[in-house]
Image: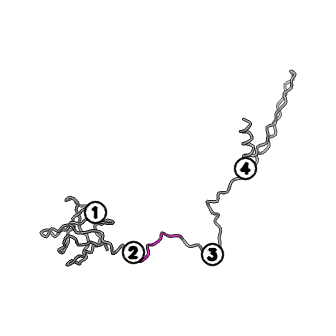
């Protein structure tokens, strides 16, 4: 118990408690208790955390930290990577089956079809996965798209 008192005094700066001497003899007089004077507690020192910097006005302007933009070379390299590949073509309905390699394709995206004899751009108007219309196709999905021109298996599809 003494250990805890010592720790409390060290942390909070409390003074030692004073022992009040009790009279040994019995007294017939009743003593009225005078209000004891209490010392005002010492204000504890608050630790200032270094994590939150103090905001002060300075003459130098600080630049806002924005999300880093991709360098031009990286963007160009990503644009050169195909998003999908044609796996099959159905000539009687002008539809192609695409398998997505990277990213995702949504309705309204503009696709560029490139191959040995194929080179055209087209917006995605409708897409289907297992004969069910969908709005978004993600990496690894096989989906059907209506195309305006003939495509061949192995043609690459780029998203513009």
Q: CA distance from mark 2 to mark 1?
A: 26 Å
Residue in view at x 37 percent, y 75 percent:
77
Is residue 105 shown above or below 1? Answer: below
**Of marks 2 and 1, which one's residue comes earlier in the chain?**
2
Q: CA distance from mark 4 to mark 1?
A: 62 Å
Pointer 2 and pointer 1: residues touching (CB < 8 Å)? Answer: no
Residue in view at x 21 percent, y 58 percent:
130
Report x, y in % for residue 106. 29, 66
Pointer 1 and pointer 3: residues touching (CB < 8 Å)? Answer: no
According to the picture, the residue beneath numbered tag 3 turns out to be 60
Quadrant location of residue 119? bottom left
Pointer 2 and pointer 3: residues touching (CB < 8 Å)? Answer: no
Q: CA distance from mark 4 to mark 2?
A: 57 Å
According to the picture, the residue beneath numbered tag 4 turns out to be 44
According to the picture, the residue beneath numbered tag 2 turns out to be 75
* Secondary element at tag 2: helix
Residue in view at x 79 percent, y 40 percent:
16
Residue 135: mark:
1
Is residue 135 shown above or below 63? Answer: above
């Amino acid at each position: 118990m003494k250990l805890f008192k010592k720790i409390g005094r060290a942390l909070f700066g409390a003074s030692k408690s004073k022992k009040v001497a009790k009279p040994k003899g019995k007294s017939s007089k009743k003593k009225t208790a005078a209000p004891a004077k209490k010392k005002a507690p010492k204000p504890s020192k608050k630790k200032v955390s270094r994590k939150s910097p103090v905001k002060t006005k300075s003459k130098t302007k600080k630049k806002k930290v924005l999300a880093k933009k991709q360098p031009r070379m990286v963007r160009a390299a990503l644009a050169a990577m195909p998003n999908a590949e044609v796996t099959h073509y159905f000539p009687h309905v002008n539809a192609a089956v695409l398998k997505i390699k990277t990213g995702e394709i949504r309705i309204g995206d503009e696709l560029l079809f490139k191959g040995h004899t194929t080179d055209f751009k087209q917006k995605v108007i409708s897409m289907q996965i297992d004969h069910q219309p969908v709005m978004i196709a993600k990496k690894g999905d096989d989906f059907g798209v209506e195309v305006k021109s003939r495509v061949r298996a192995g043609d690459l599809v780029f998203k513009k």
